[in-house]
Image (cartoon, rainbow, N blue to C red):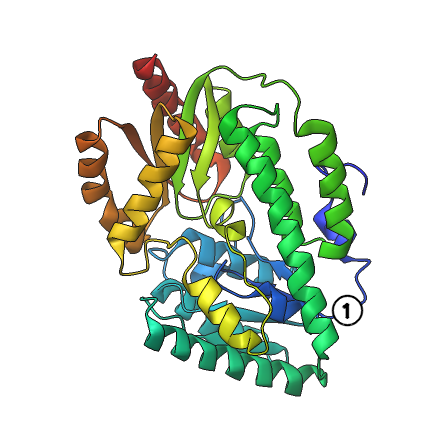
């Protein structure tokens, strides 16, 4: 496991002795999940759907259908259970089908407020308390304060290293590409943080200050769920350099710093609910201001907005976001994907044209 960029997920997970619990959304507090088992983010597969379309409508989020398909195909049999965040209606539907198809395994649905006021944080805390009670009951475990503090500490250190590497990519002081960076973030979602941290620290020392090798058009990538390195590599092979992002599978997953206090559930509820928002949250101004701030700090030449098909939350925000970009003289491109690599040819043509236009 010395090569941080090529860790085989299935091979690695086969060595895990703790209960493995799947999750699907960056709003789930990993600090809490880790004390009960080994949390692993479920992404599904980048292939055509085989069986899930018989249980979910074809006009539903391809990510949700892909995750279900992986489960139905037996590719996730190592999971002892799964926790779902109410990030959207499609995820709620997935949770219901998942529960029916995986009887006896741990299952929990956590409601997520759409705002981040005091009442919303209190409500989210109650949801996390409910989750904690369910985890204790199912796994017959009562985590100690020492275990909880240790979990808070290791994830804080891990995210700090990811932020350092991310910041250096924004500044152009490292040769780490967008494709390499997303591989690292992906690996951090399934490798034990205590094993992953020293590997990441060594990587940051060795590659974190290497000369920037891609002088192409500086692009910020925003949108919903993009985890496949091929999309990042496609963009960078088109004459661009991804210097920043606003993705739940990348920057928004580690731009969070919950601090340990006695009311640790309250701390988690507050930190996760106040992290950079996704389009499902109601404070659109906060989301847009965050995106504009990243564009400014990264000195991006343009923005590529990628959305999965049928994602109402993100597709609904496109017209307004396009107006904001135009008003601020930010060149932008909207592209849509189906969560497979089959549409890459069409995407590449549009991205190459966008990069050429900027040049």
- Quarter of the rendering containing residue 96: bottom left
User: How many discs mark residues in the rendered view?
Assistant: 1
- Residue 229, percent across and down? 56, 36
- Taking 27 as reference, is 179 left or right? right
The relative height of residue 174 versus residue 39 in the rendered view (above or below) is above
Mark 1: which secondary structure? loop
The residue under label 1 is 18
**Position of 240 relative to 127 (above/below):** above
Q: Residue at x 37, y 18 (%)?
A: 355
**Left or right position of 197 against 112:** right
Q: Quick one: which residue is furthest to the front in this view? A: 261
Which residue is at a point 54% across and 50% down the rendered structure image? 254
Residue 11 position in % (x across, y down): 78, 50
Where residue 129 appears, as percent x and y from the top left, is 52, 82
Front one among 106 and 263: 263
Looking at the picture, does residue 256 appear above or below residue 207? below
Relative side of 174 to 310, left or right: right
Say which residue appears at 64% left-offset and 64% top-offset: 152
Quadrant for the C terminus, please: top left
Evaluate whether residue 300 shows in this view.
Answer: yes
Would you say 139 lies left or right of 325 here? right
Residue 38 visible in image: no
Q: Position of residue 337 (x, y in %)?
A: 39, 40
User: Which quarter of the figure is the N terminus placed in?
Assistant: top right
User: Residue at the spot x=35%, y=74% of the render?
Assistant: 118
Residue 222 placement: quadrant: top left
Q: Give whichever of 322, 307 is nearer the camera.
A: 322
What crowding class fits label 1: few (fewer than 14 Cα within 10 Å), some (14-19), or many (20 or more)? few
Query: Which one is in front, 104 or 27?
Result: 27
């Amino acid at each position: 496991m010395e090569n941080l960029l090529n860790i085989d997920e299935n091979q690695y997970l086969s060595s895990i002795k703790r209960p493995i619990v799947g999750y699907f959304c960056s709003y789930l507090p990993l600090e809490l999940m880790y004390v009960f088992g080994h949390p692993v983010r479920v992404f599904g597969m980048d292939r055509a759907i085989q069986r899930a379309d018989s249980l979910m409508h074809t006009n539903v989020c391809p990510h949700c259908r892909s995750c279900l398909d992986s489960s139905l195909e037996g590719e996730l049999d190592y999971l002892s259970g799964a926790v779902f965040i109410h990030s959207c209606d499609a995820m709620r539907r997935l949770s219901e089908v998942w529960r029916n198809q995986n009887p006896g395994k741990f299952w929990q649905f956590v409601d997520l407020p759409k705002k981040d006021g005091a009442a919303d944080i209190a409500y989210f805390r109650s949801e996390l308390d409910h989750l904690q009670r369910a985890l204790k009951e199912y796994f017959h475990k009562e985590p100690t304060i020492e275990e909880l503090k240790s979990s808070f500490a290791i994830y804080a250190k891990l995210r700090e290293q990811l932020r350092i590497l991310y910041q250096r990519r924004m500044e152009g002081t490292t040769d780490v590409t967008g494709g390499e960076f997303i591989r690292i973030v992906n690996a951090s979602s399934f490798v034990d943080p205590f094993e992953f941290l020293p590997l990441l620290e060594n990587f940051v020392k060795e590659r974190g200050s290497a000369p920037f090798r891609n002088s192409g058009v500086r692009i910020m990538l925003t949108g919903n769920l993009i985890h496949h390195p091929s999309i990042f590599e496609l963009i960078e092979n088109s004459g661009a350099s991804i210097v920043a992002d606003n993705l739940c599978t990348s920057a928004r997953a580690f731009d969070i710093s919950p601090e340990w206090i006695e009311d640790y559930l309250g701390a988690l509820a507050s930190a996760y609910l106040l992290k950079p928002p996704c389009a499902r949250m109601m404070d659109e101004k906060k989301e847009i201001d965050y995106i504009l701030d990243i564009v400014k700090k990264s000195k991006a030449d343009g923005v590529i907005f990628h959305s999965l098909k049928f994602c109402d939350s993100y597709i609904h925000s496109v017209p307004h976001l396009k107006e904001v970009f135009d008003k601020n003289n930010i060149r932008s491109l909207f592209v849509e994907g189906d969560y497979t690599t089959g549409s890459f040819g069409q995407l590449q043509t549009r991205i190459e044209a966008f990069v050429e236009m900027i040049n």
